[in-house]
Amino acid sequence: MKRSVVVTGMGIVSPLGLTLGRFWDELSAGRSAIGPITTLPTERLFVKIAAEVKDFDPSASIDPKQLPYMDRFAQFALVAAIDAVRDADLEFDDALRARTATLIGTGIGGQVAQDESYKRLYQEGAQRFHPWVVPRVMTNSAASHICIQFGLTGPSFAIASACASAAHAISQSLAMIRSGLCDVAITGGSEACLCLGGFKSWEALRVLSADTCRPFSADRSGLVLGEGAGVLVLETAERARARGARVYAELLGTGMSSDGTGVIHPTVEGPTAALRAALVDAELDPSRIDYINAHGTATAANDPTETAAIHRALGPAAPGIFVSSTKSMHGHLLGASGAVEAVATVLAIREGIVPPTANFTKPADGCDLDYVPNIARKRPIDAALSSSFAFGGLNCVLAFGRHSLTA
Amino acid sequence: MPNPEIAARVIRIMKAHVFEQRPIQLEDTVDDLKIDSLALAEILFDLEEEFDLKIDFNANRPEDADFQFSTVGEAVARIEAMLMARQHAGAAS
């Protein structure tokens, strides 16, 4: 018998806002946070738009003694984690600290710190680095700083699978709670990729849109980079019930796969396998799925492939499912996207409202599902999937459900 | 007739991204040479580096790109035109 795992707290640092309430208001209104880049010098950029986190003040919640050790991505993660723990109304004692896992995904880690230090070295000819470049850059620093904040002593590490990092972290947390390795997990992902080196690397792939993000839409022109973090508090349903915690949703299952073919081009088979595996793990018939928060990058490579995978995995149920890509509003948060989109999916279940695919005009070739164009729709959601498909061909799908159905 | 020196430089770049080991002709098409979108991304980068040019090309909207070519000869002609445009822009300023 699998232990049931529920979501009892969430925190977010996103281009759409720094609180769950703001994030949801913007998402459900179909408003996009994509705009001109303000945090980088743009003279040397060919693409000048992104979804930036605005008005983020790390010193408002982070101990000033810890800040010098932290890259922007770790700051995002820690602020989201502080908010998630507060949201879950979780109080730690030493026993719980040892039984809490902290798993945070990131695509690259401390890119801003690395970019700044290399600029000093190669461009400015500096002879020395700040002493904390290594602790700022390392991928596990987000997870470590969350542990330090709350004195957590359970298992903790970073998970990296490019754009599926956060979803894989949440999956691994589910597996660890189910197996009894821990009782609570603080999990999600963070990415701060809007530094000159990071942005130029994406530009070179020739997949960035200079217009906006239009997933599944005929006039789509590519993805738009975003930044931020999402953190979820997961715990056993039994524990949540015993402490009288508010439950957002149940994490019913996960499906993972790798394409095993190429680094850049996705397959239909890999995402299909992950979608199917999530349904099996969650013990859900495709007819039970009301909503899919799609990977939906708005690239020529992803959109038709993902649509085909949804058809294959969900069969005759596919046309009746609402499928939206919230990347149209918060951009592509890379290693954080799986967590921010998991938060969007859980809020959709809780509110009974499906956030739309913004910036949609008419369907692209090979894209024939109901993408909830531009305007949110009311629909009671019993079960929903959130998909993340990464460069490197690594796929992860999370299945969430309304808790009242299973409690 | 294409400038032989520019044609040779373009062909050398193409050859590095084509798996078939045979001489490349100006008449060869993208399909003949089995240039897929990944090889194309590398070829465009190498051409930009070789000739110090900026080639606008979004892989999601290849049909909108300035830089269209179906044969190696057409790629050479595009490069020549871009170099010419740059020269004129330089002379005018």
Image (cartoon, coloured by chain):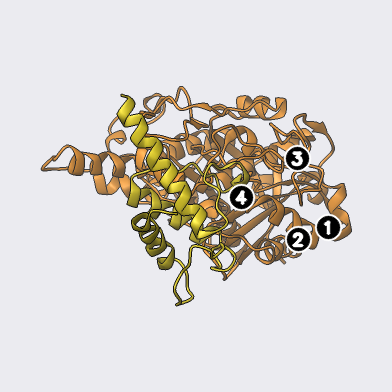
The reply to whether callout 4 and callout 3 are in contact (CB within 8 Å) is: no
The residue furthest front is B1
Of callouts 1 and 4, the N-terminal one: 4
Q: Is residue A318 above or below residue A179?
A: above
Query: Label 3's element?
Result: helix
Q: Residues within 10 Å of mark 3 (few under 14, many from 20)?
A: many
Q: Residues within 10 Å of mark 4 (few under 14, many from 20)?
A: many
Give coordinates of residue A276: x percent, y percent.
74, 64
Q: Is residue A320 above or below residue A374?
A: below
The residue located at (64%, 48%) in the rendering is A295
The reply to whether callout 2 and callout 1 are in contact (CB within 8 Å) is: yes
Of callouts 3 and 1, the N-terminal one: 1
Question: Distance between the Cα atoms at labels 3 and 2?
Answer: 17 Å
Residue A279's disc number: 2
Give coordinates of residue A172: x percent, y percent.
56, 59
Quadrant hosting residue A16: top right
Residue A135's disc number: none
Point out the frontmost of discs 3 and 1: 1
Colour for chain B in the figure: yellow
Q: Which residue is mark 1?
A: A286
Q: Which residue is mark 3?
A: A349
Residue type for callout 1: Pro
Give coordinates of residue A147: x percent, y percent.
41, 46
